[in-house]
């Protein structure tokens, strides 16, 4: 009994010192929107633009650290089930069934919403004879009916693979001519060095005309024109640009979602708000994606001459 009392006293003393600093004040280790550190998982398709978001966020809020890992979309959703992952950034939100599942596990539903609009970009070598495709032609390539090697941006279930399955194949299966590369940058390398392949990557990997690395790739590859399936006028084709995404002309547009697992305002909420407000939305715009939360329309103005 005496040993138990001593052990209990020592344990309580240890817990006291852990919860207090040297001045005797209690230390609150919980993160806030402007302080602390968290882990997030991000679809690898969005790495370039999220790296820019994190760079500006960390410089603006130096007391925060957002640890990010880039991986396929399916792996991001698996991470969401882990206590250590606070947020994921992917190309789809939660279904009602998924939201109910997380509510049963967490006792609250995660938040999710669209931050911007991205695109799956079709790329070909500069020397390729084909750079204009209808959706039917893309389907023939992806199912193997047309014998042309197609290179995807990962060896597992990426958002690009899922999107093409849902939007282009619509129930059909990939052909044996569809191969997986290790990452989006590897897809760019493969297409740069082979004139008889076609690649699929996210827009932020190849759409930034100010990025010197992307500029170097654009000397070796081209972004293909795709059939505008929503246009009333027939035989119109569009490249993946901010304008073609905003007006619904480019057919392989997709949303960029956050899914946030917080029931109180923490650093995840702070980073989500940063990406949703002016500076974060401007970063999406500067990366040639289409901001979903704020519009930045140009207006002509005229100042009246003074009398």
Image (cartoon, rainbow, N blue to C red):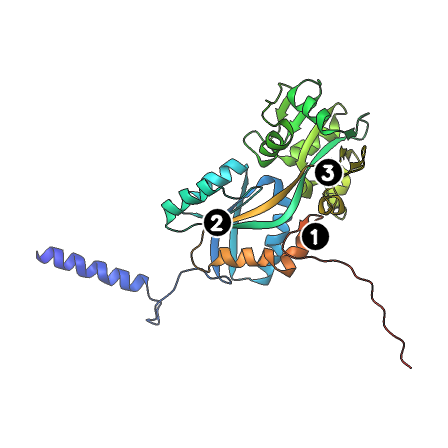
Q: In the picture provided, is 107 more to the left or to the right than 58?
A: left
- Disc 2 designates what residue? 39
Q: Position of residue 203 (x, y in %)?
A: 69, 41
Q: Residue furthest front?
A: 232
- Disc 3 designates what residue? 230
How far, Cα to Cα, is label 1 from label 3? 23 Å
In the rendered image, which quarter is residue 182 located in?
top right
Asked whether disc 3 touches disc 2, contact meaning CB atoms under 8 Å apart, the reply is: no
Quarter of the picture holding the N terminus: bottom left
Does dot 1 land on a helix, a strand or a loop? Answer: helix
Residue sitting at 82 percent across and 63 percent down?
Answer: 300
Residue sitting at 46 percent across and 62 percent down?
Answer: 32
- Specify which label sits upstream in the sequence, 3 or 2: 2
Local packing at callout 2 (Cα closer than 10 Å; few below 14, some 14-19, many 20+) is some
Q: Can residue 82 be seen in the rendering of this structure?
A: no
Local packing at callout 1 (Cα closer than 10 Å; few below 14, some 14-19, many 20+) is many
Q: Position of residue 254 (x, y in %)?
A: 64, 41
């Amino acid at each position: 009994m005496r040993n138990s009392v001593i052990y209990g006293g020592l344990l309580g003393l240890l817990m006291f010192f852990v919860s207090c600093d040297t001045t005797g004040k209690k230390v609150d280790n919980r993160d806030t929107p402007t302080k602390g550190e968290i882990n997030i998982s991000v679809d690898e398709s969005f790495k370039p633009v999220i790296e820019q978001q994190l760079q500006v966020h960390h410089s603006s809020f130096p007391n925060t650290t957002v640890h990010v890992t880039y991986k396929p979309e399916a792996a991001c959703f698996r991470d969401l089930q882990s206590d250590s992952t606070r947020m994921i950034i992917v190309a789809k939100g939660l279904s009602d069934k998924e939201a109910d599942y997380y509510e049963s596990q967490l006792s609250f539903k995660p938040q999710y919403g669209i931050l911007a609009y991205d695109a799956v970009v079709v790329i070909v070598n500069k020397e390729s004879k084909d750079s204009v495709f209808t959706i039917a032609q893309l389907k023939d390539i992806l199912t193997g009916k047309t014998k042309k090697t197609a290179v995807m941006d990962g060896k597992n279930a990426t958002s690009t693979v899922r999107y093409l399955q849902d939007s282009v194949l619509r129930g059909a299966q990939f052909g044996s001519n569809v191969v997986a590369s290790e990452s989006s940058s590897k897809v760019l390398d493969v297409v740069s060095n082979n004139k008889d392949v076609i690649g699929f990557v996210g827009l932020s990997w190849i759409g930034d005309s100010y990025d010197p690395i992307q500029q170097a790739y654009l000397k070796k590859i081209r972004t293909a024109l795709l059939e505008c399936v929503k246009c009333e006028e027939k035989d119109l084709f569009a490249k993946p640009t901010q304008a073609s995404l905003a007006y619904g002309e480019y057919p392989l547009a997709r949303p960029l979602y956050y899914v946030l697992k917080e029931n109180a305002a923490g650093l995840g909420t702070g980073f989500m708000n940063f990406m949703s407000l002016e500076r974060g939305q401007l970063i999406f715009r500067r990366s040639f994606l289409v901001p979903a939360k704020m519009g930045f329309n140009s207006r002509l103005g005229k100042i009246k001459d003074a009398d």
